Amino acid sequence: MFRSLSLKRSFQTHLKTLIHCPQPPPPLPLPFSPIRTLSTASSSDSELRKYLGYTALLIFCGATTYYSFPFPDNAKHKKAQIFRYAPLPDDLHTVSNWSGTHEVQTRHFHQPENLQQLEQLVKESNDKRTKVRPVGSGLSPNGIGLARGGMVNLALMDKVVEVDKEKKRVRVQAGIRVQQLVDEIKEYGLTLQNFASIREQQIGGILQVGAHGTGSKLPPIDEQVIRMKLVTPAKGTIELSREEDPELFYLARCGLGGLGVVAEVTIQCVERQELVEHTSVSNMKDIKKNHKKMLSENKHVKYLYIPYTDTVVVVTCNPVSKWRGPPKFKPKYTKDEAMQHVRDLYKESLKKYRAREITSTSPDSNDPDINEFSFTELRDKLLALDPLNKDHVMKVNHAEAEFWRKSEGYRIGWSDEILGFDCGGQQWVSETCFPAGTLSKPSMKDLEYIEELKQLIEKEEIPAPAPIEQRWTACSQSPMSPASSSAEDDIFSWVWVSLSFAKPRENSKRRRSRGAKGD
């Protein structure tokens, strides 16, 4: 009883304590702080200053770009006007490659007239640490010689310095063009061993890029050089030959202008001779059977493949026989008969794409007489109408196949006349070089490459125009040559593919679209 009474009293005591527990005091007011009161306004001002800074920076960058476009301040010597493009300098040079697919603008385009001026230019460029790139006729489809920073062109250094008729050697300045050189040495009974498709290249350029002709026993053109004079930034003018410094000579011979500017070369020539060209039409099955024989028995040979057809145009060139003389051959078709199918397709295509009837004899037509166009000119015009339309390109290719079937025959002329090839007009080009075995034992990889290429074209439905050109050369000792090899018997195949025949200025949108795919 006493325990229960004690617990009761304890409970009552604790209950009173809880009931009379003092309440916590109310929170005290915070002291006045001017910084906290103004923080919101300060944040707004900071944001405002930040965006004002961005705006000022944008205006400054725009003004700087405007007054510097398209060249830096030291390139301007005309006052810019508000709301107009900055005027271009008066001494601005626009330089394009041969086919017009690449161009650059530069204020530094040099054309020295002699070796002393060239040496001075290279020295000054080296002292000022400015770039200068050698550029010839701009034949490279990729515009490899074009440089906005500065270029040097040796077109004014185009003299034949010396001709050694006994040794069949000629020493020339590097700016001379191939056709000019051939014309000047033919009176000595000499000519170049091989030629590329055209004759407008400068000698320095055609050697430095490792250009080639065709013939499995003939090397690329750089192999014809036996001595050269090179203007370098560090060592001045040096003379190179395989006897004195073979390693540097072979490296500089096909050096893309990277080791210096080629000023003068000595070329090993051959006797001028007549060739007989034979053009025939075959197919891939027969080509495979006779390929090894074709390569070994013909001095020059090339195949022209026509996509979306089985047509292969075979062109061989050999010296005219001194005993049998030139072959006697009467063509089955006249030139007009061979061209008729292409001309008809052109008239038909004009009606479709221009929605009007144009005839070659219409006195009211502003277009020139189509009978005056060569085959390649007419093909260019056909392809330019719709170069990205596969069906249209296929029609053009079939018309070309028909043209070659009616153009079989022989042609006789001097080597510099026969070995040229009319490639057509402006175009995007891709060329590949790869080993093809040896002359005694071809690997046949060259024909496999073409078969896979044509299959890919058809599978992807690529509007590929004709021709796909395939040629062969022997090897080169120049390390930077695409056909470089130390084995004398090695042969290389060169495959040339045209990506577009659209003219850049007339079909700029098509060119950009096709160029993006081609690259």
Image: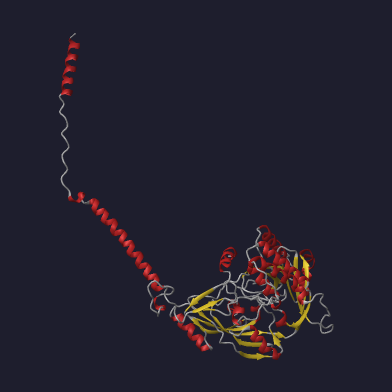
Q: Residue at x 76, y 76 (%)?
A: 336
Determine whether 50 is above or below 411 in the image: above
The percent coordinates of residue 281 (x first, y second) are 78, 70
Q: 332 or 117, which lies in front?
A: 332
Q: Position of residue 400 (x, y in %)?
A: 72, 69
Please state which of residues 147 and 310 is positioned toward the viewer in this rendering: 310
Indicate the position of residue 412 as horizontal and vertical percent values. 77, 82
Q: Is residue 286 above or below residue 229?
A: above
The residue closer to the viewer here, 427 or 205, is 427
Seen in the picture, residue 434 relative to 167 is either above or below; the reply is above
Q: Which image quarter: residue 170?
A: bottom right
On screen, residue 481 versus residue 32, left or right, reads right
Measured from the top left, where is residue 21 in percent x and y? 16, 26
Query: Which quadrant is the C terminus positioned in?
Result: bottom right
Seen at 19% across and 14% down, the residue is: 7
Report the side of 84 relative to 411 (left or right). left
User: Can residue 440 be seen at all in this image of the molecule?
Assistant: no
Residue at the spot 67% in from the left edge and 64% down from the top edge: 392
Choose top left, top right, bottom left or bottom right for residue 62: bottom left
In which quadrant is the N terminus drawn? top left
Point 84% across, 82% down: residue: 324
Q: Is residue 348 above or below residue 119?
A: above
